[in-house]
Amino acid sequence: MTGRERIREAMAHGQPDRVPVMCQLSIGHYLINTGIPPSELWFSSEAFARALIMLADAYGFDGILINLPGQPENWREHVGSIEPRPDGSEDVFWPNGEVTHFPADDNPQHDRRGKRRSPTLEEVDPGVLFYDDPHVACGLKYPYGFGPDVTGAPPRKGEWPPYWFRTIDIVREEVGDRLSVHSEVFSPFTQFLEMFGYQNALMYLLDDPGKCELILQAYAEGTADLAVRQAERGVDAVLISSAFAGAGFISRGQYEQFVLPYERYVIQKAKEGGAPVVYTHTCGAIGDRLDLMVATGLDGIDTLDPPPLGTVDLAEAKAAWGDKIFFKGNIDSVNTLLNGTLDDVMADARERVKVGMPGGGYILSSACSVAPRVEPEKLMALAVVAQAYGSYPQ
C-alpha cells in the first residue's frame, strides 16, 4: 500500500497492511534539519513544501501535515530588508517599521515597536471577524489583514487570496498518491486566545461570556469556510488545531460551553462542503473530555498525551471510543522522544503499536509536535517499529 492508502484505511477504521506513521514536526525541527533559512521557510511556499516532503521521506512517514498558510511568490517585495545573524537567525524589517525576529530553531517573535497592541474585548466588533491566522506577515492584527498592514477589510466567505492554498497545491502535485496530505485550520477557541492573549482571553470568558460566544461563532464561520476551501484543493484530511482546549487551560464545563458547539459547527460545515476527514489536535490533559470531543462529530483525535504530560491511557481510550473515531499519537514527545534514548523510543513505539493497532483505526505518532532538537534517528525508528511489529494479517 502507499502511505496515502495506508492512512486513509486507518482513518476509516480499516486494517491497512501495517500501522501507518505520521508525526507533526515543529517548525524548529524543519529549520534545524533542512538548512532552509528561517524567513524562507516561513514565507516561501516552495521552500516549506520542500521541507515537508524532505523530512517525510527521510523519516518514512506516510503523510504530511501542512500547518502554515500558502504565501505569494513575490513575498520578498513586501519586505523592507532581511538581516541574518551569526547564530543562523534572521531579522526581517517591514516597511511599516515593525520587525520580526526569526530564530534558527523556533517560531518567529514579532516586535510591533509600539505601533499596535492587542484589542480589548470591548473594542472588538464580532461583525468584522471571520478568520485570524498568526502566521501571516506581522502577525495577528485587528481588523485582520493578510499582508503586513491592517487593511480594515477582513476576509469573507470564499474571499481567500489565491496564494493561501499554494503550499497545498505544490505538495499535492509533488507527492501524487504516495503520501496522505493533511491541511490545518485553527479552532475558533485558539483564534480567540491568540487575538487577546491567553491570560486576558481566559478572563474574558468569565467577564462577558455572551460576547465571547459571539466572537467564537464568527470565527467558526470563517474556520469552516477555510476547511471547505482546503478540501476543494484535494487534501485527504483537515486537522483542527485546538491546542489549548485541554484541562490545563479550561474546565470540562468551559469546554462544553466555549469549544464544543463551535468545533461541532466547523466539522459539520466542513463535511457538508466536501472535507473527507476532520480530526482535532488538543494537547495535554484531555482524558476528562474525550466524550465531549467525540460529541463534536470529529473523525479522530490527535496527540493523546500520556501521563505525565497528559491524562490519556491509549488502551482505555480505544476501549471506550475506538469504534467511533481513530486515534493518532500517544508517544510522549518530551520524556520519550526528546529526553529518552533510541532504545526508549523503540520500546515505547512498540507498546503503542501493540495497544493501538487491534481493530485498526490507529496512526503511530508523537503525542504533540516533535521538538526542534529531537534526533532524526529516533523518528526514523518509528517506521522501523511499525514495519516490524505493526503488520495486519492480510
Image (cartoon, rainbow, N blue to C red):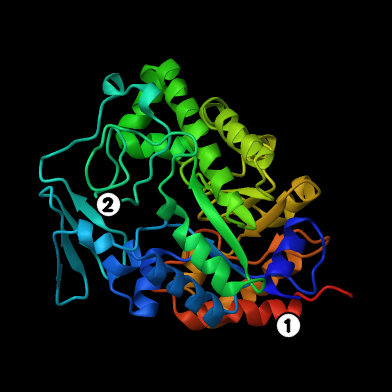
Work out whether 6 lies above or below 253.
Answer: below
Horizontal side of 26 relative to 182 (left or right) equals: left
Type of amino acid under label 2: Ala
Check disc 1 and report its element: helix, strand or loop.
Answer: helix
Examine the rendering and report whether any part of residue 372 can be seen: no
Residue 73 image position (x, y, % from top left)? 34, 63
Examine the rendering and report whether any part of residue 269 can be seen: yes
Relative to the observer, which residue lies in front, 181 or 308? 181
Q: Which residue is mark 1?
A: 388
Which of the 4 image quadrants contains residue 190? top left
Relative to the observer, which residue lies in front, 111 or 361? 111
Type of amino acid under label 1: Ala
Measure the alpha-carbon separation of dots 1 and 2.
44 Å
Specify the farthest residue to the right.
394
How crowded pointer 2 is (Cα within 10 Å; few <14, some 14-19, many 20+) is rated as: many
Work out whether 316 lies above or below 220.
Answer: below
Check disc 2 and report its element: helix, strand or loop.
Answer: loop
Work out whether 62 lies above or below 315.
Answer: below
Horizontal side of 260 relative to 297 (left or right) equals: left
Q: Residue at x 36, y 26 (%)?
A: 128
Picture disc at residue 20: none
Relative to the observer, which residue lies in front, 123 or 321? 123
Q: Quadrant of the N terminus?
A: bottom right
Counting the numbered discs, the total is 2
Q: Which residue is mark 2?
A: 137
